[in-house]
Image (cartoon, helix red, strand yellow):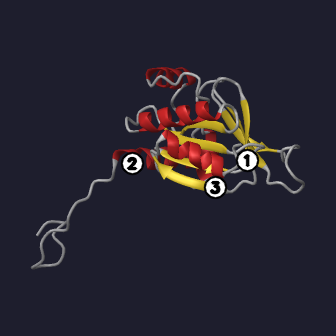
Amino acid sequence: PGPLSGRPGRPPLPMTTPRPRTLLALAVTAALAAGATACGSQAATTKPAAADAATSPGAHKGTEITTIGHEKITVPGTKPTALFFFSVGCGECAGGAKSLAAAGKALNGKANAVAVDMDPSESPQTIRQFLTSIKAPHLPAAIDTGAALSQKYKVAALSTLIVVDPAGKVTYRATDPGADQIQTALQKAGAK
């Protein structure tokens, strides 16, 4: 009997293969936990931010995201935010990023939509090329430096989309949702 045969007289234990995007997400998370950081001075950053002045007293402190286009977005902020966790190397992520871009465009500034790259080794230029290839060049994107967002919102798999309302509550979580689903979730979270 070999190492996978189990106890004598029993058939071998089945081998399972994890899904590629889950494997990549786990590898990225492990690298981040070991202290890896985003490369280049243009890399987007995430850091704790003071409570938004426009929110009610006692509001949750948010995380300030600086996108690869140097836009600053605080989550939670005054508007609901959809965060789509991806990697350029994840082929399955293209559809979810397209859907996020379409939902963000349909809501016309009533909510934030941000693509969050979980792989700190991917450069802003590579992310811009990815967004252009999926016909979403204006979708705000950030690199999850130090895994701040993925840890805060307990995201362990690529192609995960979450919606965070202005109070800081995750009101929606899905894998590769369509644009209509994202738009509805953002409206339920307060996009008016």
**Residue 120 visible here:** no
Q: Is residue 153 above or below residue 89?
A: below
Task: Look at 65% across and 31% down and name the residue there.
Answer: 44
- Which mark is first along the chain, 2 or 3? 2
- Which mark is first along the chain, 1 or 3? 1
Res 23 label = 2
Q: Are marks 3 and 1 in contact (CB under 8 Å)?
A: no
* Secondary structure state at the residue bearing disc 3: strand
Q: What amino acid does circle 2 point to?
A: Leu
Task: Look at 51% across and 29% down and name the residue there.
Answer: 122
* Secondary structure state at the residue bearing disc 2: helix
Which residue is the site of mark 1? Answer: 76
- Which mark is first along the chain, 1 or 2? 2
**Residue 121 visible here:** yes
Of tags 3 and 2, which is closer to the observer?
3
Measured in 3D between alpha carbons, the distance from the residue under mark 2 to the one under mark 1, in whole angstroms, is 29 Å
Question: Which percent across, then down, holds residue 191?
Answer: 69, 44
